[in-house]
Amino acid sequence: MIKIVPIASALLLSSLWAVPAIANDFPSCVVKLKITAQQEGLSKETIDNTLANVKYVSRVIELDKKQPEFSQTFDNYFSKRVTDWRVQQGRKLLKENKQLLEEIQETYGIPPQYLMAFWGLETNFGSYKGKMPVLDSLATLACDPRRSKYFTGELMKALKLKEKYDFDASQMVGSWAGAMGHTQFMPSAYTHYAVDGDGDGKADLWNSTADALTSAANFLNQLGWQRNERWGREVKLPEDFNYDHLGKAQSQSLIQWQKLGVMQSNGNALSTPDMNAALYLPAGHMGPAFFGYKNFDVIMRWNRSTFYAIAVGHLADRINGGVSLKVAPPKQDNLSRARVKTLQVKLNEKGFDVGKPDGVMGTNSKTGLRAYQRSVGLVADGFPSEATFTAIGIN
């Protein structure tokens, strides 16, 4: 799901944000949303035909507040997303849409295999675009105080899209959070980046493959996609690699990586164009290693997940005829957040500051963990391995 959030209008920063949270107060919240809609310039007809009929959906609030008990491992994530079926289907659809995709590449600079990969990961190539009424979902979230500003803004944009393109409310279905169409655009992304790719005068991301793929290309182009550059690649690390240079903050030139002994995954020497790369080890030093180039960062702006960006990039490579990973992700159990939180507490107690324990292995946690691992003679890859848990005293 796309995470880009445009700046809200000044009107939406008014006291109308103070909306009730509980279902019983939903009608009074809708009254305030109607006032906001009027201030946003929406017509009386649109307001009367939509906001007057929106429904509170308790399931949406449950999903929004649900914190997963476990953090998924790279193996479990990757194996469910980069599948042989998606590779074959992506190749099939790439051929079927060849002319359209070539035109899109000429205009926006996005190679076809990447659009197939995004399409495949977002909605299984359009086979599942979500079934929840978007306006109900957004109204429900707008009436919950946790993120009411953001979702009120998204609701207003969804209403404007309905008004602009005369969408039927029953057609506007998507995810529980309001993401829509083949490419799962939030209303703000739809507003700013959707393109009429088939020339019918309407950017319809539900029913037009041309609109959806053209819009995805426009979005990636606007995010800064580098023409004629790949997303990244799997690489091979030398046995004596010291793991001091992990993550985006430690990005360096390919020449520097070559001097450190990093090779292509097949063991050949790195080519060294004037490019920087960041090194990622999503499963620790026992798993595959990846370079991420500038286009990797662009993918991360679509979805801020390293796992997602690697999956998109590798699926694109496979659709384009590439081979499977040289190093398969090791089988690992999903980590409980409670166990990670205990690890963070232990690291803080030992003087390796990782910030407030929250059960999520973010940048600070990985940095602190690497320092601890180095201090006790473990491979300092910042990965919470069983050896690390044992060393720090966690069963």
Image (spheres, helix red, strand yellow):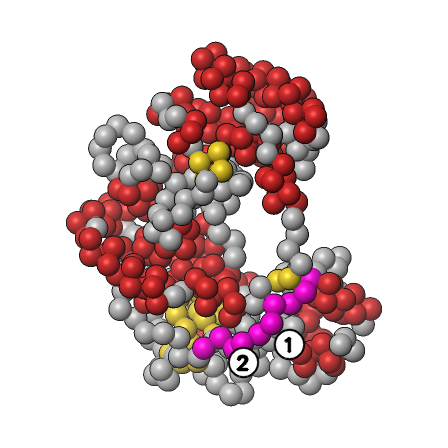
Is 176 above or below relative to 37? below
**Which numbered dot is residue 286?**
2
Image quadrant for the C terminus? bottom right
Residue 22 location in percent, x, y?
Answer: 70, 30
For image coordinates 60% across by 40% down, the residue present is 59
Q: Position of residue 167 (x, y in %)?
A: 37, 26
Task: Identify the image quadrant of residue 141.
Answer: top right
Residue 365 appears in view: no
Q: Residue furthest right?
A: 349
Marks 1 and 2, how far apart in space?
A: 10 Å
- Give the numbered dot on residue 165: none
Give the magenta range: 328-337
Residue 32 locus on image (x, y percent): 62, 19
Magenta-drawn stretch contains 63: no
At label 1, the amino acid type is Ser
Give x and y (percent) for residue 73: 56, 67
Q: Residue at x 51, y 61 (%)?
A: 306
The local crowd at label 1, few if under 14, some if 14 to 19, many if 20 or more residues have their Cα within 10 Å, is some
Residue type at numbered disc 2: Met
| Residue 52 placement: quadrant | top right
Label 1 close to label 2 by CB (< 8 Å): yes
Give the residue at the far top of this rendering.
44
> Is residue 339 left or right of 134 when viewed as pictured?
right
Mark seen at residue 385: 1
Q: Secondary structure at mark 2?
A: loop
Circle 1 sits in a helix, a strand or a loop, which is it?
loop
Task: Give the mark, 1 or 2, whose residue is nearer the N terminus.
Answer: 2
Give me the residue at 67% from left, 59% from top: 69
